[in-house]
Image: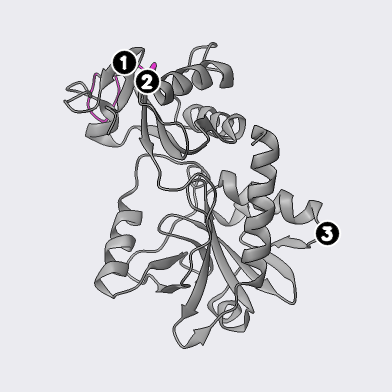
Amino acid sequence: MAVLYVNNNGTVLSNDAPTIHPGNRGHLYGDGVFESIRIMSGRPLNLENHIKRMLDGARIIKMRTPAYYSTKFFEDKIVELIQKSEITEGGRCRLSLDRVSGGAYLPESNESTYYIEVYPYDVNHFELNAKGLEVDIYQDIKLQKNFLSNYKTKAGLIYVMAALSAKEKGLDDLFLSNDRGNILETSSCNIFVVSNGVLYTPGLDEGCLAGTMRMQIINLAISHGIKVYECAILPQNLLAADEIFITNAIRGINWIGGYRTKRFFNNMSRKLIVLLNEHWEKELGI
């Protein structure tokens, strides 16, 4: 297997030895934002939307970014790592922005550093799960809507605890809800509910993550005549649904096979995964 490489703020290093510096605020305080980016045929997907969300998130947490932090700048850095790591087909990239070292909870500076890592992925297209996922609702911690909710910050412990709880219960994932009981997302994905051929998904004003794949699925659906509504999703809506699927940038679409005693179809999921792959094959010319 080829050696994999990372880029720590301009310095390219192999990832088989420590590459994060002592005092890194992302490590110490979760003081940063990040993006998970899918690679197909050795090229990063949907980069413009990822970079926009990341830079918006950096601005929200009062982190300063230089003017040259553009889509083109990060694309060049990511492609360099992909090629050096000999990833020619499927892969995934994690791109982080951290506040520079110094200070405790109060930072000494609001300047930023970047960190990029790439890994191979086992398939070179978006693949629908063969077996439907089994899910329930996470009860131990509720999501609180705030001005950070729509961004991928490094404060991810609630999602870690939800994923651990799912594993302990023998489930594939858990839905996360707010204190009003509205379903917002899962431990790693946005959620779509299908009823009578119409898609329903929690709105960003509810406090869910502004997922890049979420937005792509909304746009794909609308462009193919499928109605989409952003609205509150309650547990009873899950039980009344014909289908539920979840989305993220790496896995694309995963369909839910069961929620408690309710079983679901995957007709819409199968249709949308075909459209998603067709879109990126056309974009990449493959």
Chain part drawn in magenta: 102-112
Whether residue 124 sits left or right of residue 118 in the image: it is: right
Q: Amino acid at mark 1?
A: Val
Question: Which residue carries the number 3 mark?
Answer: 225
Q: Is residue 194 magenta?
A: no
Q: Where residue 165 appears, x then y in whole percent?
A: 28, 67
State whether residue 269 is above or below residue 7. Answer: below
Whether residue 141 sits left or right of residue 179 in the image: it is: left
Mark 2 falls on what kind of element? helix
Q: Where residue 257 appears, x then y in whole percent?
A: 50, 76
Rendered image quadrant of residue 143: bottom left
Residue in the picture at 35% in, 55% down:
159
Residue at the right extreme of this rendering: 225
- Crowding around mark 3 (Cα neighbors within 10 Å: few <14, some 14 to 19, many 20+) is few
Question: Which residue carries the number 2 mark?
Answer: 84
Front-lying residue, 34 or 273: 273
Q: Amino acid at mark 2?
A: Lys
Question: Which residue carries the number 1 mark?
Answer: 12
Judged by depth in the image, the label closer to the viewer, 2 or 3, is 2
Mark 2 and mark 1 in contact? Answer it, CB < 8 Å: yes
Front-lying residue, 205 or 114: 114
Q: Is residue 123 visible?
A: yes
Q: Is residue 232 visible?
A: no
